[in-house]
Every structure is written in C-alpha cells, then in structure tokens.
Amino acid sequence: MSSRSKSINLFATRNDWQDLLSSVEAQIEFYYVRTGALDEDETVNRIDSYLGLENLGISRSGTSSRDPAYLCVRRGVDVEIRCVEQRSGGTLCFVDQIMNVDSVAIRIGGQFEGNILISGQIGTVSGSEWSFRAFSVFQKEVRKRFERAKSYYVGKGAMKLLLEGWRLTANARSPEVYDLSLT
C-alpha cells in the first residue's frame, strides 16, 4: 500500500478522549508509546491502555504541536527506534512513524490554564494495511461521537465548553480571531 497522509483535527476533553479511546481499544489491539526524542540509553515504555496515558486531556504547553504525542502501535509488533548522529556530536534517537509503519499517531491537547482547550490530532503517514485499518476505526468513532465544526471535530464535552465561552484553539498565544467559533 502506498504512503498516504491522513489526519483528523479535533477538540476533546478528558471524558471525550476516554469515550473515544475505550471504543477504539475494544475494536483494535494496540499499545501506546510516547513519541519524540530519547537519549541513546533510554528505554521505550509501553502503555497498554488509555488509562495509563499521562495527563490525559491536559495541555501543559498551550500549543498543540508541543503537547505529548503517542503512537498507537499494533500489538505484537516491537517499537523501532531511529537513531541519528548529530553534527555537534552525540546521537539522538526518535520514536516516530518513520520506523513504525503499523501505527497511528495521536496528539491529545486538552485544557490549558483555566478556560482554554487546545486541539488534538489523530493521524498516520503510513500506508501499511494495519495503520489504514486502524485509522479508519478512529475516523469512524470520531464521526460517531464528535460534531463537525469547520475543519475540526468537537467532542460533546468540548462543545459544552465552547458554548460556555471557552477558547478552543491550537495555540493559546495566538490571537482569538484564530479560535474555533460556531459563526
């Protein structure tokens, strides 16, 4: 299968994520690993359930691109780590989809400093049969549980917050004109 990038942008509270992930976990066998750079001797921790995801529904950075992301990796497949020697010396190792084709990436986002909800994302750049099937399950469950608002899907809890006047945004520091609105 060829490589095809697919993604879903969404706003979700902790409860929205729990509802979504519990449904997806019931349909597909996978585990979670945190993406990003590792020290050369650092080990990758597998997380068997969304219940083990650290700070689910909380954004510590206020910026979607800086919040933790996880790979949902097909159970039975080991995570591959990609190491890159640095020009300045040393080696950085990465957990990402480049080496882990049987995966779907999720970025959680969540509540930030009071009344701001940071966007999340579900996506894959892999063209493997498993990642395509897993992404399709995520997509089906998002469409079933979330409401479409412009280019985002909004969970029930997130929609309630939007209607209460919360900011729904990808970056808390960006002007409010870029926030999601229903108008």
Image (cartoon, rainbow, N blue to C red):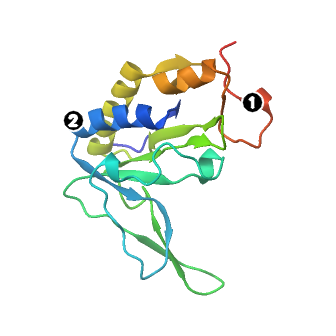
The residue singled out by tag 2 in the image is 27
**In the image, what residue type sits under mark 1?**
Tyr
Location of the N terminus (image quadrant): top left
> Mark 1 touching mark 2, by CB under 8 A?
no
Pick out the residue farthest to the bottom. Answer: 89
Q: Label 1: few (<14), some or many (≥20) within 10 Å?
A: few
Secondary structure category for the residue under label 2: helix
- Is residue 121 shown above or below 37? above
In the image, what residue occupies the spot 39% across and 52% down?
53
**In the image, what residue type sits under mark 2?**
Gln
Q: Which is nearer the eye, 130 or 146?
A: 146
Residue 41 seen from this side: yes
- Is residue 93 shown above or below 142? below
Q: Is residue 24 left or right of residue 172?
A: left
In the image, what residue occupies the spot 53% across and 39% down?
120
Q: Which mark is residue 8?
A: none
Q: Which mark is residue 178?
A: 1
Coordinates of residue 51 in the picture (x, y in percent): 33, 48
In the image, what residue occupies the spot 38% across and 29% down?
139
In the image, what residue occupies the spot 64% across and 82% down?
87
Coordinates of residue 4 in the picture (x, y in percent): 44, 40
Coordinates of residue 106 in the picture (x, y in percent): 44, 45
Q: Is residue 174 left or right of residue 17?
A: right
Residue 155 seen from this side: no
